[in-house]
Amino acid sequence: MAARGSYVFVVFAMVVSITVEGTIDEELSRFLGEKEELLRTLEQDVLVGYQRKCGTQCNFDRNIYACSSPVLEEESVCSQDYGVSISTDAGCTTCSNRKLSMSRSYVRTPSREATCTDALNMDICLSQGLDNSFRENWMSMDKEESGVKWQFFASQSGMYRMFPGVAQERCHDYDPRLRAWYVSATTGPKDVVIVIDSSDSMDFRPSTSPLTLMGLTKEAVTSVLWTLTHLDYVAVVSFATLAQQLTIQNKNTLIRATRDNIQALTQEVRRVEPNGHTNFEAAFRTAFDILRRSEVVSRTAGCNKMVLFMTDGEPTRGEREPEQLTQIISSLNQREDGSKFASIFTYSVGELADTTITKKIACNEGGVWSEVEMVGTASLAEQLSQYFDYYGTLREGQGQVIWTEPYMDAFGAGEVITGAKAVYNTTTVPQTLLGVVGIDVAISATEKITTDKQDLLDTLRSRSSSCADIRESSECELEQLRQKVYEQGTIRYENNSAKWCDPSLAQECTLPVAEQCDNQYQQYSNCRNHSTEKVDYVAASCCSRYDEPCPSFTTRISSSLQLLSISVAALLSFLYVNMILPS
Ligand SMILES: *[C@@H]1O[C@H](CO)[C@@H](O)[C@H](O)[C@H]1NC(C)=O
Ligand SMILES: *[C@@H]1O[C@H](CO)[C@@H](O)[C@H](O)[C@H]1NC(C)=O
Ligand SMILES: *[C@@H]1O[C@H](CO)[C@@H](O)[C@H](O)[C@H]1NC(C)=O
């Protein structure tokens, strides 16, 4: 009797001490850790799916396109928890209950041109097995407490598979590869210095473009800035006759790429006006001054550093002699131990741009040179973003989970944080990025644990701070990587040996050709052209359009499911108590 009494007392005491001593940090840690576990199950599913690359027969009827899906009355549930439908249609803005499929994910593709390409079809096909984990993850958690909203996979070809399935009004305006969580998951935390030419000649307007080169550059830089996250540090330098950093809050170092800082920095970028000559030397001196100063005061992610340098001309001030100039840049980029500070990526913009020095700099400094094709702003932005294709490839081992800052969900689910993890095939050399898995978590769920925003941000950062391991690469490997960026990157360049840093390496360092499946064509050729099957968006996405009461989420879930989540919670607290008790 006495023993039993004391046992009860111990349990009671434990419960009290957990509530008192269990710090907010532990709670947050557990909360985020659970989601990281879910990400690992999704990663496994992707690996299993892609392993079957040559054996999978794809039934495209099982894949539902978000913008042309049949209306799934039978399988859909109505929910207010995923925000209102995003629509310009007056009928639908009054509808606050979205129709969601809890049995299947829906897919999206990034551009109208890329509806039925082989690469996209293959990704649609190989990733359909994710539905099982999506569903299981969803069934196994308490919706309110876990805060999990979307679970998704974005492939390297730009295919996006999201769960719960939800109809979309437009299907070709979302490229997951340019989202901050995607970039951040593939590159890890990083320092980025963007250097833009603002000389007179940037006022030139190419005949194919409504914007001047300066205008195009500003848009591209803005879009690159928005691919950064609070795990990164950034600076923007503008140069003409002289060079200057675009500062905010008078900081002349790198600044953390928080959403507020990026907002302020894009304002500064907008203010740049073309004026003056072209001084490459001053530009690079300023860029490396910033990198050095930032290390001294620890304003750095402490991981990989890169300089993105854009110009439309050739040097007319400062050092102009190609040999001397590349020499100066090499020594600026050298640490005392001989290693390099940063990889330098150079972009020749427009027809008059120098292509010799810019290429030479990238080749010397472990980066990639690109001749930017002037066919539109998206193109320039995408071409700028190829640096992360490069990092994705140079990486060794599987990706680490990264957490973003809170932001408004693009698909209407309110304020969320995203946890994301890059998935690689690590058996190829160099390893291949398959895509990124992710989970959006409602910020309202974290607020139940802590309302201290700084505390949340600190935790998110500390859980995402591991650097990506970058392989030490030989010149030959770097050359292969450049080819890979040119040929298989977000932007495909023609196979042009002028792009090679060292054409003499071209024979021995050609990228190994990816193995093709024998019957690949038949396997992936049945893709349905989803633009041809347009259904009424309002009908496909809205429950009870005109203020009718809608069955709420919870009443649609069977009570056995609730029972399950209760018993899971009970089991967890049991384990927790028992693991703590011995100490
Ligand atoms: C990784 O690549 C190898 C070689 O191409 C292939 O045999 C294997 O199935 C791939 N695995 C995955 C998970 O993609
Ligand atoms: C690219 O060009 C090089 C030489 O110009 C050639 O050896 C190589 O086979 C080409 N690669 C492809 C994929 O066409
Ligand atoms: C898909 O639609 C586009 C444009 O309507 C067309 O050019 C293309 O051939 C179609 N593809 C298939 C596989 O039907």
Image (cartoon, rainbow, N blue to C red):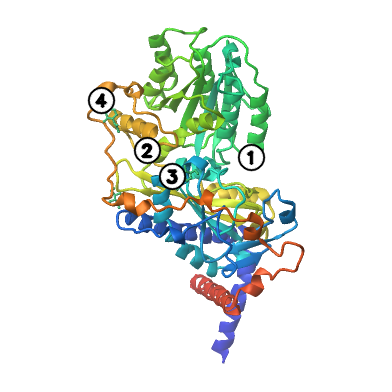
Residue 201 visible, this angle: yes
The residues tagged by marks 1 and 4 sit, at their Cα atoms, a distance apart of 43 Å
Foreground: 389 or 209?
A: 209
The residues tagged by marks 4 and 2 sit, at their Cα atoms, a distance apart of 19 Å
The quarter in which the N terminus is drawn is bottom right
Residue 299 visible, this angle: no
What number is the disc on residue 156?
3
Please provide percent x and percent y for residue 71. 59, 62
Please provide percent x and percent y for residue 201. 57, 12
User: Which is in the foreground here, disc 4 or disc 2?
Assistant: 4
Residue annotated with mark 1: 259
User: Which is in the foreground here, disc 1 or disc 4?
Assistant: 4
Foreground: 214 or 542?
A: 542
**Residue 23 found in image quarter:** bottom right
Please provide percent x and percent y for residue 228. 55, 38
What number is the disc on residue 394?
2
Secondary element type, mark 3: loop
The residues tagged by marks 3 and 4 sit, at their Cα atoms, a distance apart of 28 Å
Q: Earlier in the sequence, mark 1 or mark 4?
A: 1
**Residue 577 found in image quarter:** bottom right
Q: Earlier in the sequence, mark 3 or mark 4?
A: 3
Amino acid type for the residue under numbered disc 2: Leu
The residues tagged by marks 1 and 3 sit, at their Cα atoms, a distance apart of 25 Å
Please say if the residues under marks 2 and 1 sit with CB atoms less than 8 Å apart: no
Q: Earlier in the sequence, mark 2 or mark 3?
A: 3
The residues tagged by marks 2 and 1 sit, at their Cα atoms, a distance apart of 27 Å
Secondary element type, mark 1: helix
Residue annotated with mark 4: 505
Q: Earlier in the sequence, mark 2 or mark 1?
A: 1
User: Which is in the foreground here, disc 1 or disc 3?
Assistant: 3
Please say if the residues under marks 1 and 3 sit with CB atoms less than 8 Å apart: no
